[in-house]
Amino acid sequence: MPERSFEEMKAAQAVLESRIVAACNKCGRARERVLLIWVSKFHPMESVEKALSLGAVDFGENRVQEAVLKFSVKRPGVRCHIIGPVQSNKLRPAATVADAIHSIDDLKSVGKLERICSEFGKHLDILFEVNTSEEASKSGVSMEDAESFLLSLPETEFVRYRGLMTIGKNTGVAEDSRKGFAFLRNLRDKMKARGGAFSDFSELSMGMTGDLEVAIEEGATMIRVGTALFGERDYSRPVNDPV
């Protein structure tokens, strides 16, 4: 599958934007309350450059190595979001390149990120992944354990607790994800009400190409969209091929 041309990507952006606006209008939310993250995983740097030309500033990558290849050179105003699971030995490069990590689901990673960021003097936003689809193949804290996990988090100076992330059910039916999205919103609200370390716990990273409308209706503040913008991915592309 060839990469989309600039014109094709521009047209896709317009279609996606109309979907986002319609979803916001349906539930009475302001469009600016929903951040679009362009998921550029498995797409070459050439496609990222096209997205930048279209005004994209927030990009999502699943793999740390790919994020480093594409976003180590900082551009003013451009933010890199790590949205896939991060192994312990990849936390240092992840903390170096990322502005936010959405996929934290264990205490050891929090402690290690705090130590790494203290060395850099860098503040890092993190979100905690909850497995609301209850699928064994997905990462994240279980719904049953999510609240107790959050309550066990340590006080941090450099790592900032910003919210929650989830992936909807992989059924092909967007409505099937609504219950999980609502659970995530309610948990976010409950933790934010506690204040303290959760004073800025406002983000809900949920919703992708197939279920973004339901996610927006349930309060998503960040949606992670790749296919609807960049087209189908070429999974045969080597990770060390940034172009």
Image: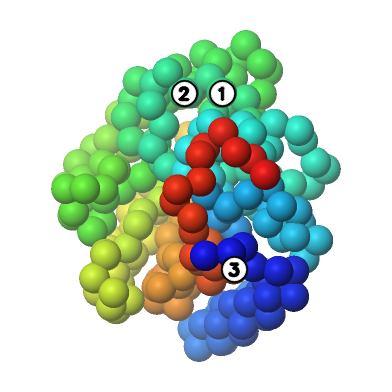
Pinpoint residue 133: horizontal percent, then vertical percent. 23, 59
Q: Which residue type does callout 3 highlight?
A: Leu
Pinpoint residue 59: horizontal percent, then vertical percent. 62, 51
Dot label at residue 90: 2
Secondary structure under tag 2 reads helix
In-image side of 81 versus 186 (left or right) = right
CB under 8 Å between callouts 1 and 2?
yes
Q: Is residue 160 visible?
A: no
* Residue carrying label 1: 93
Q: Residues within 10 Å of mark 3 (few under 14, many from 20)?
A: many
Q: Which residue type does callout 1 highlight?
A: Pro
Q: CA distance from mark 3 to mark 2?
A: 28 Å
Figure quadrant of the C terminus: top right
Dot label at residue 194: none
Between 44 and 223, the one nearer to me in the picture? 44
* Residue carrying label 3: 229
